[in-house]
Image (cartoon, grey):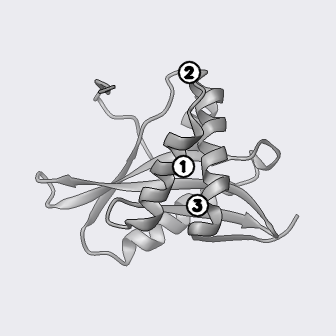
Amino acid sequence: MATTVIRLGDARDKSTLVAFNQAMALQTEGLELPAAVVTAGVTKILENPQHGFYLIAQCGTEVAGSLMVTNEWSDWRNGNFWWIQSVYVRPEYRRQGIYRQLYQHMKILAADSEDICGFRLYVERDNRVAQETYQALGMRPTHYQMYEEIIE
């Protein structure tokens, strides 16, 4: 296997990130996301770093996985939580430490920033494999449940 390089996502990754988001939504929620909407969303992050950024795990010439980081200001802590979202690892690269490398790289970036106070993510209730991975990396479940209202 080729060495994995973790780097910031950029415009060359757009189509891959769109495909990853569509694959993840179909796999986890049975949703078929419209390509135009996902492409616009990915483009917005890539062109506006104040909204967040992508980390890319590249193995040789292939993108093996990615995650997106967005900010949430905490007035309780006077700092930003980095929300980990849109995590996807190609099936053939799963269980090989790709997510661990993405997560560790994100932590290095956070250590270089003075206002990052922690990391958060949400996970499907039944996705035990992902939950075990997150816990093995030091994350813990919280006492909060997540609610949402989607505006159509």
Helix, strand or loop status at disc 2: loop
Please tell me in which quadrant of the rendered image residue 78 appears. Answer: bottom left
Residue that protrudes farthest toward the right in the picture: 1
Check residue 102 in the rendering and tell me which mark sits there, or answer none.
Answer: 3
Residue that protrudes farthest toward the bottom in the picture: 112
Q: Residue at x 55, y 63 (%)?
A: 55
Q: Residue at x 62, y 37 (%)?
A: 22
Q: Residue at x 63, y 62 (%)?
A: 13
User: Residue 73, position in %: x, y?
Assistant: 20, 55
Distance from label 3 to label 2 (Cα)? 23 Å
Distance from label 2 to label 1 (Cα)? 28 Å
| Residue ID for mark 1 | 39
Helix, strand or loop status at disc 1: helix
User: Residue 66, position in %: x, y?
Assistant: 61, 55
Label 1 or label 3, whichever comes before in sequence order: 1
| Residue ID for mark 2 | 126
The kind of residue on which mark 1 rests is: Thr
Relative to the observer, which residue lies in front, 104 or 80?
A: 80
